[in-house]
Amino acid sequence: MYDFLHRIASLCRKELLAIFKDPANRVILVVPSLIESFLFGYAATYDLVDVPYALLDQDRGAISTELVARLDGTGIFHRVANLQTPADITRAIDSQQALIVIQIGPRFEQQLNAGESAPIQLILDARNSNTAGSAAAYIGLVIESYNTALRGGAGPPLTVEARAWYNPNLETRWNLLPGLIASLSMLQMMMLSALSVARERENGTFDQLLVTPYSPIEIMIGKAIPTIMIGMMQSTIVLLVAFFWFKIPMAGSLLALYAGLGLFAIASVGIGLSISAVSANMQQAMLYTFMMIMPLILLSGLATPVRNMPQILQIATLVNPLRFAIDLVQRIYLEGVGLFTLIHDLIPLLIISAITLPLAAWLFRNRLL
Amino acid sequence: MTHPHMAAAVAHALHKRFIIKESGKIVHAVSDISLEVQAGSLTALVGPDGAGKTTLLRMMAGLMKANEGQLHVLGIDVAADPQAIQDRISYMPQRFGLYEDLSVQENLDLYADLHGVPQTMRRERYARLLEMTNLARFTQRPAGKLSGGMKQKLGLACTLVRLPELLLLDEPTVGVDPLSRRELWEIVQQMIDDEQLTVLVSTAYLDEAERCARVFVLHEGKLVAQGTPAEIRHHARNLCFVAMPPQGQPPRFLQTRLLDNAENVIDAVPQGGAVRFIRRPGSDQRHLDAMLEGAPVMAVEERLEDGFMTLLRKQYIADPVDPTAREAVVRREAAEGKNQGQGEDYVGDVIIEVRDLVRKFGDFTAVDHISFSVRRGEIFGLLGPNGAGKTTTFRMLCGLLPASSGFLQVAGVNLRHARAVARRKIGYVSQKFALYGDLTVMENLEFFGSAYGLSGERLHERIGIVMQQFDLKDKEKSPSGQLPGGYKQRLAMAVGLLHEPDILFLDEPTSGTDPQRRREFWRRITALSEVGTTIVITTHFMEEAEYCDRIVIQDSGKLLALGTPREVRTQAGGKDSRLNMEEAFISIVEQGRRQYSEAAATETGP
């Protein structure tokens, strides 16, 4: 047993040396994950920060003026144009000058005073559907609150107040960055493990390794462990950026987080090593990896919620380890739940690992010679 | 066409320096070379590895700029207008860029397009090239599926799709078997005879340089000699002899004794069952007699290789195998009671046994029912043309490839059941450098040592021994990938021997290396064999088969000959055959192919 561990340890040591002695590798292992966590943190956001809108106020009464003033006071909406006729609307939207046009009809105040309902029309540029949708909802809130204020004491004060849990300000970043902790490390782990055998094959070192008493399974373990270690390092980089730079508070325990990530890493490395066992050269390994990565990310729920997907794709997500890992990380990080609560994520990850790793082992034994 | 008496290339005081990034050291790849290549003839560049042959050729092809000096090719200043030269010459680099997924015909078309060969000329040109290269039957086959020799011929054909005014060939026959080598040279010779082509070829095979009109000998970037082959040979005039070793003893024992006596002997090689050696001028006759131990000696004609070795050894003495290290190993191994190989009369126990071994790839049979055995302490050679199945056999012996059927036992272990156990007892040195290039010498040794289960003190003791044995002492912290070629091979052998294997497998270890390094390499091999290590080796240099105790010759997966070099020569040319090993090899392979096609003809005949 001691002999076995010693031999595995020296395999791991060799693998890590080979990876880190290459200066290009050293950069690739740190810089992209830093850049991507900053990029995702800043660039990929659906948050309402700045919504340009145009106003077509055909009433020009006191109420409409006050309503518009409330909107301008949010700091998010800013008026880019005052339109004169309905014909101007098309131009304002088409030119992308305004994301939203608010049209207040000529009889607005009159209708209100008469106790009738007075409609306000919103015209949205749905080419940017996410932001426009949130903006419309936001405007709805503003009008609602004005409505209540307007009615004053008349009738029971009915207020609808939405409160978002775990992400009180509904920042996209809070969603994305914990997701990245899992997805970025998966990307690197799959790439590294897929290339590991192919690189040795191309350099001719693989034969030299195969004539040693190492069994294929030992070689596989010796390649899996360093890759998992590097995957954990990647996750840690993103985690540090999320916590210290973007100040996203961590609700759960680090131990639970790393335990979950470890299981996830085993599942991903199994996929990567299977790819590497069937690829004849580095080019093939790269192609297979890219082919796998796109669907894995799309079907993970990182960018779009799984429940919005068509039924058949929802079923497809069940074999995707990333889907469970993202859910797991988000819930531990943001909700602070323990591992026992996440059994519905852990069991699928266990099952996936129990398939991919033995598959890789089988391929190693049967495809390498 | 250039005028026959004009020089095709003229170099004057040419210099080329490289700076090694890691160490900042400057290497003088070419220093102060002045030479003239005659038009309409065949000229050879010979010299040890790193002599500057490739650099010189690349400068002539306009692919590299000289630091100093002038270089005119076909009357054009290379520095001023490299494109004008590239339009008129052809250059075939060591690894020619064939597109492996394209067929033979598509590769030819591609190169014809690249060189702008007009459609009207193509048909005739293709027909001629395909006929010369014997590739007409394979036009539809992807280049990647051709054997090494065929690939090289296709490369030459692609280089010749357009008739150049000067043809530059960089070691065109490296890794090519004697048969294909002969064919390649026939093509080149035919082009020279028919079209007055000017050819400049660099080569590590000195028998190839023998057929050239002029030879330039380079060493460490300098031109050390030039002239006709006869003029180069002349340096060894009246110094060459052949000595017959006692009956029943492999010539390598006498050869080793002679070679180790560098004071009196310039060079010694086994040849045709005897030992060919070059005396140092003014050597001590009594010393020589003592070493020869009464073996009969006969003066022989000098060859180009003798002249070359005399020239090189005059200037530098190769660092000999450290005798103390060797003795230390001998003593220790003797204490451990290991067997020592003692030549033909000594019959050790069988250490490798192969019976009815078959390996199929799909419906292609690469190895076809072969049987042989190797005894402990033997040097055993696997010979055969490219694609004969010797690499497949070799890989099965090392446990890198499972056999389709048959019995295969290595070091007392059946490879079918206990591959891992067998691997502990073998060492393997591949043809290409196959260690981790980014890791240092020490890190590689430590890794492979622990791969074989060595650890702690034992590991470092063994590392110390092999480092001394292979002169790696001052290199332990150097990244392995940046070592010079000779060091890389020594490191590979050190790794192969770390765990004191019973058998050392070497796959074409001398492919593409110069005579100097080949001697050094074989000196190490004979030393290893003396301490009882069994050696299994593949090689393309037929004269190297003379170092072996026994050899097999394979072709088309079948075993054509098995025995001592003497027995194999007898099989080829009758008793007391005067054939050299290369002639014997070619004769046996051709005989085998004739029988095979006759058998096939009677089978399918009426």
Image (tube, helix red, strand yellow):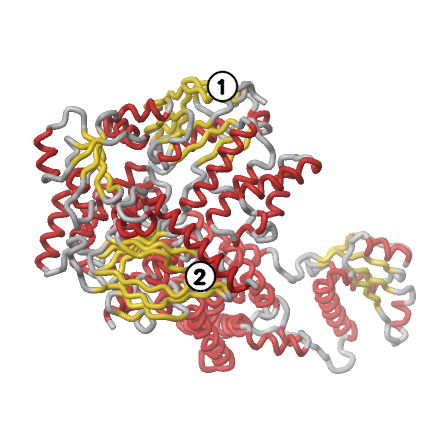
User: Of A275 and B116, which appears nearest the observer?
Assistant: B116
Residue type at mark 1: give it.
Answer: Ala
Q: Can residue B402 be seen in this view?
A: no
Q: Mark 2 points at which residue?
A: B366
Query: Toward which corner of the image does residue A259 lie, by quadrant?
Result: bottom left
Subunit that carries the residue with mark 1: B
Mark 2 falls on what kind of element? strand
Against B516, is B430 above or below? below
**Within 10 Å of the Cα at label 2, are there few (<14), some (14-19), or many (20+) other Cα atoms?**
many
Q: Distance between the residues labelled 2 and 1?
A: 48 Å
User: Of B74 and B147, which appears nearest the observer?
Assistant: B147
Residue B480 percent coordinates (x, y)? 32, 46
User: Of B502 and A117, which appears nearest the observer?
Assistant: B502
Residue at 27% in and 24% down: B235
Q: Mark 1 points at which residue?
A: B7
Subunit that carries the residue with mark 2: B
Residue A354 percent coordinates (x, y)? 45, 77
Query: Toward which corner of the image does residue B31 lie, by quadrant?
Result: top left
